[in-house]
Structure formats: structure tokens, C-alpha cells
Image: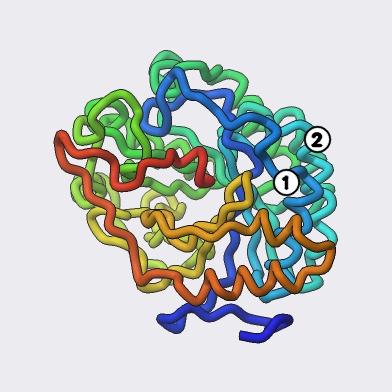
Amino acid sequence: MAQGSQEMIDPFGRRITYLRVSVTDRCDFRCLYCMAEDMTFLPKQDLLTLEEIDRLASAFVAKGMRKLRLTGGEPLVRKNVMWLIRSLSRHLGAGLEELTLTTNGSQLWRHAEQLVDCGVKRINVSLDTLDPAKFRVITRWGDFAQVMRGIDAADRAGIKVKINAVALRDVNEDEIEGLVRWSHGRGFDLTLIETMPMGEIGTDRTDQYLPLSLVRARLNDRFTFEESSYRSGGPARYVHVRETGGRLGFITPLTHNFCESCNRVRVTCTGTLFMCLGQDDAADLRAPLRASEADELLHAAIDAAIARKPKGHDFVIERGEKPTVSRHMSATGG
């Protein structure tokens, strides 16, 4: 693939058009399925600067990336992150079709209007429960009222909100019907996600794992699902819920993987490119980024990495087994 090519094709013929960039591994929550409470985060000097992230993401846009999602950790806790978002927004309408982010919602009340000004039209907000006390248990440090304030601010600003909820056995499985009704009542899509075996969290994930095949079967007793061709660009597969009029998505890395249509790669806040969320193979983009002010080496490193993107992941959850990959989701980009 020559430099300047307007598309990236992996070895299995999949067009790579979606880049997720982690701007920080830090988060102001400690969600029990995501990280240990006493997490050790990267030294700040190890992170790419915001200017380097801008240049790196821009190189992907030049090579045909159409959707860019900023993630973390929690992206909105990165100092001066709005500068980065504003800078990246220059690509909208000039190759980039969407600039968006995934957030825990804690800082949305500060930034919602600025996000709109930067061309952000849609965001994902992680929210696993509507019970403030349970929210505190799941997030360990989170303030439910502050997240609701942020969601309300985003909604008022005209941002389309999608709620992401991780289905957790014996934690929120009795709330999922309520999450459907609340989300759709607010005009929000809802996506349910299976917990993923990434990083040590201090507990056995088999105690948390709730197959979405079981969740969907239970919801079938309450709702009428109509298959939908809607796609958001990610791995979720959607149905239309007749009773609520809303969309419900399922992300099922364990019960039914979504690899056959994968169009995504991820860059960490240190400049490491992971071609697959569930595999350890990675490419260092920081070295070529810093080796030259020109982008030839960077483009070549991206091409070489895409050329070895694997067919799929090997996620498995089994009692007593270590996570499939040792890095945490917060380090990879949620």
C-alpha cells in the first residue's frame, strides 16, 4: 500500500475506516469490571503530547480513516483536551466524517457546548445503573448526580447520546429492562456489552460475566424486537424495540464475536497501535512519529501494522484463568 493511499485494507479484505484514540489511561472512576481500585497509571511523561496525538490522528485521516473516537480512561480528564478536539475538528468535511468520544459523563457538564462547537454530534456515555447507591458501588468513586447533570447538558446542547451499559451478573441484571425504558424514554439508544477479559481487576470475572444471549432471551419476554440494519460504525448489532420505539444494541465479544466485519484499530496514549482489542500484537508509532517531522516513516509504520491485522480475537472467560490480555481496557482505549 503506497503512502497517500486513500484507504487501508487489511489481509482479510476489511476496509479500516475507524480509529479509536486513547488520550489518557487515567480515569476519575474505578469501575469494578474495568480496573483495580489501586490502579497505577502511566507517568505523564510517557504520554504523547496533545500535539503528537493530533499529528498521529491526522496521519490516519490522510490515509482514509473516516471515523475518529477519542477514549481513555476518561478523555475529558486530560488537561487541555478541548484544544485537541477543536484541532481535530478541522478534518470534518475534509475526509473525516465523524468526530466523537466515549465518556463516563462526569465532566460533560463542563464541556457539552464546546463539544458541539467542535462538530461533535454524537457521544457514548457509559452508565451501568440508574440506582445512585449501586452506581457508587460499581464505579467506586463516581457521583451519579454529576453524571446525570452531564447527560442533561449534552442533551440540551443537541448532542445525540447513546448509553453503554455493561451487563453484570448479580449487579445490574435486574435493571436492564429499566435501562431500556429509561434510555428510550429520553430518546437515547442503549447498547448492552458483555464484560471483557482484559487486565487484572482483583476479582474473578466469571462472577461478573452475564451472557447477552441470556439477557436478550429475558428481554424477549417484555419487548418485541424487530431486526434493524442500522449500524453506528462499531461492533454493536441493533434491534428496534416496538414497545418503546427505540434502538437496542448488543456487543457480544464472547457469545458471538463481531470480528468478521471489524473496521477498527486503536492507538493508546503512548502511541502504541493495537490492530485487535483482544490480541497482544502491536506497533510502535511513537518512534516514527518522533523520528522525523515528515510523515513518511509514520505512514510506512501504519501500513505495516494494518498488513498484519489478525482475523479476530480469542476472548475467553474461565474461572481461575488469567485475563486473555494483561493490559486493561483503560490502557488500550475503551
Residue topped by disc 1: 158
Q: Amino acid at mark 2?
A: Asn
6 vs 109, nearest the viewer: 6
> Label 1 sits on what residue type?
Gly
Residue 123 visible: no
Q: x, y (%) of residue 97?
A: 70, 67
Q: Residue at x 50, y 38 (%)?
A: 330
**Local secondary structure at mark 1:** loop
Residue 123 x/y as whole percent:
62, 47
Look at the numbered disc 2 and give the secondary structure of its residue.
loop
Q: Is residue 220 left or right of residue 40?
A: left
> For the point 37% across and 37% down, which residue is it?
199
Residue at 47% in and 67% down:
230
Rendered-image quadrant of the N terminus: bottom right
Mark 1 and mark 2 lie on one chain; the one further toward the N terminus is 2
Q: Residues within 10 Å of mark 1 (few under 14, many from 20)?
A: some
Other-residue count near label 2 (Cα within 10 Å), few / some / many at <14 / 14–19 / ≥20: few
Q: Residue under circle 2?
A: 80
